[in-house]
Image (cartoon, rainbow, N blue to C red):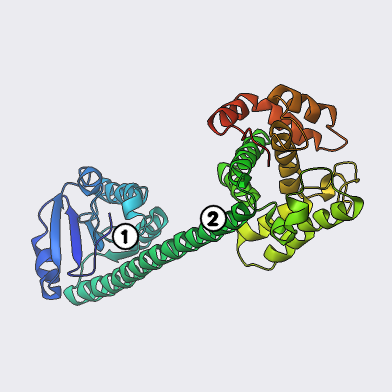
Amino acid sequence: MAREAGTALIVLVASATPLPLIEALSPLACASRLVIGLSDAPEALRGQACDLIVIDAGEGLQGETDDGIHLVAGLRAMPEHARTPILMLAGGDAAAVRRAAIAAGATDVIARPVEALDLTTRVGNLLELALVRRTAEQQTRRMARTVERAVAETAAHEREIIRRLMLAAEFRDDQAGGHLTRVAGCAIAIADGLGLSEQDANDVGLASTMHDIGKISIPDTILMKPGALSETEREEMKQHALRGYRMLYDSPSHLLQLASDIALTHHERWDGHGYPQGLRGTDIPLAGRIIAVADVFDALISERVYKKAWSPDEARRHLEAHSGSHFDPDCVAAFVSRWDDVLVLIAEHPPESRAA
C-alpha cells in the first residue's frame, strides 16, 4: 500500500526488544514500529507499507542468522515490500552472511558489533533512497492519471467528431441513421466472428459509420434520384469513396484513419472488380472487407424506390453465393457464425419501410 510523503516509517524486526538499536536510531526522529519475532514478521508486515525494514538477526547464532535471511527472502516475495529497503544486522562470519543476505534481497548488511554512527549513517542513506523512490512513484502515478484523462478526453473528442459527421450524413438522407446503426452492428458481429479483440471490433463498428461520408459531395439530383442512374451519374456516385477518404485520411486520430480506409475500400471486391482502385483479396484492408459485407447486407434488406426489401435469409444467401467473388470468404463465414446476433440487431433496428 502506497504512503504519501511525510515522516519516514522504520519497522524494526527482532527476536527481542532491541533497546540499543532503538536508542541509536532516535536522533533520526523517524516514526518506528517494533515487531518481535522473526517468524511472525511476514504476517505482521503483510499489506503494511514502510520506508525501511531493519532486521536484527541476533548475535550470530546460525539459526538466528538463517531466520533473518529467510525473512528477507519472504519479504521480497511480497509485492508491497518488493522494493522496500531492507537493512540486516547480523553477527558471525560477516562476509558469508553479507553474501547470503544480499542474495536473498537485502539492500545492505551491517556486521556486529554495530557502531551507532555507522548505523545512523546507513539508515539515513536508505531513508533518502526510499524518499526519492516514493516521490518518483507518486509523480509517476500523477502523470499516469494525467495521461489517462488526456486519452479519455481525446477518445471523447473523436467520438464527438464522428457523431457530428453522422449527423451531416443524416441531413442528406434521413434514413442514413438506421442504415449506419445496422452496418456498425453487423461490422462488430463480423469482427467478433473473425476473432478481433472487443476494442478493435468496436473501433471498426464506430469507424464504419463514416463509410459513406463522401456522399455529402454528391448532388441531390443523383443521390435522391428515384430510379436507375445513367452511366455518367454512376461514375459521379462512385466518387464518394475517394472523396470520403480525402475528408478523413490526414487526421492524426486512429479512428478517423480507420474510417478513411473504410470509406476508400468498402466498394472494393475480393475478385478485384470493385472500385475505386480495383484492389484484390487481402490487398483490401480488413476493415474495408468487413464493411463490404455489412453494407451490402443492409442495402439488400432495406426498401428503396427502385427495389423491394429482401428478407434477411435471402440477403444471407446472396452473401454466401458471392463469397470468394464479391466478398472475403472469411468475412462471410464470420457473419454467418454470428447470425443470431444479426437477427437481434435487425429486430431492434428494423429497416425503414418507406422509400429512400
Q: Nearer the viewer, mark 2 or mark 1?
A: 2
User: Do tag 2 and tag 1 residues touch (Cβ < 8 Å)?
Assistant: no
Mark 1 belongs to which amino acid?
Thr
Mark 2 belongs to which amino acid?
Arg
Q: Is residue 354 visible in the rendered structure shown here?
A: yes
| Circle 1: element type | loop
Residue 186: percent from left, percent from top: 64, 36
Question: Residue visible at 60% across and 47% down?
Answer: 174
| Circle 2: element type | helix
Query: As displayed, is residue 287 above or below residue 114?
Result: above
Q: Is residue 243 left or right of residue 149?
A: right
- Quadrant placement of the C terminus: top right
Nearest the viewer among 266 and 222 is: 222
Question: Residue visible at 53% across and 31% down?
Answer: 348
Residue 352: percent from left, percent from top: 61, 35
| Residue highlighted by disc 1 | 84
| Residue highlighted by disc 2 | 163
Spatial CA distance of label 2 from label 1 is: 49 Å
Q: How busy is the neighbourhood of tag 1: few (under 14 within 10 Å), some, or many (20 plus)?
A: many
Answer with the quarter of the image where residue 195 lies.
Answer: top right
Answer with the quarter of the image where residue 339 lies.
Answer: top right
Question: Residue visible at 70% across and 38% down?
Answer: 294
Q: Which of marks 2 and 1 is nearer the N terminus?
A: 1
Residue 328: percent from left, percent from top: 80, 38
Query: As displayed, is residue 260 above or below residue 273?
Result: below
Q: How busy is the neighbourhood of tag 2: few (under 14 within 10 Å), some, or many (20 plus)?
A: some
Name the disc covering residue 21, or none.
none
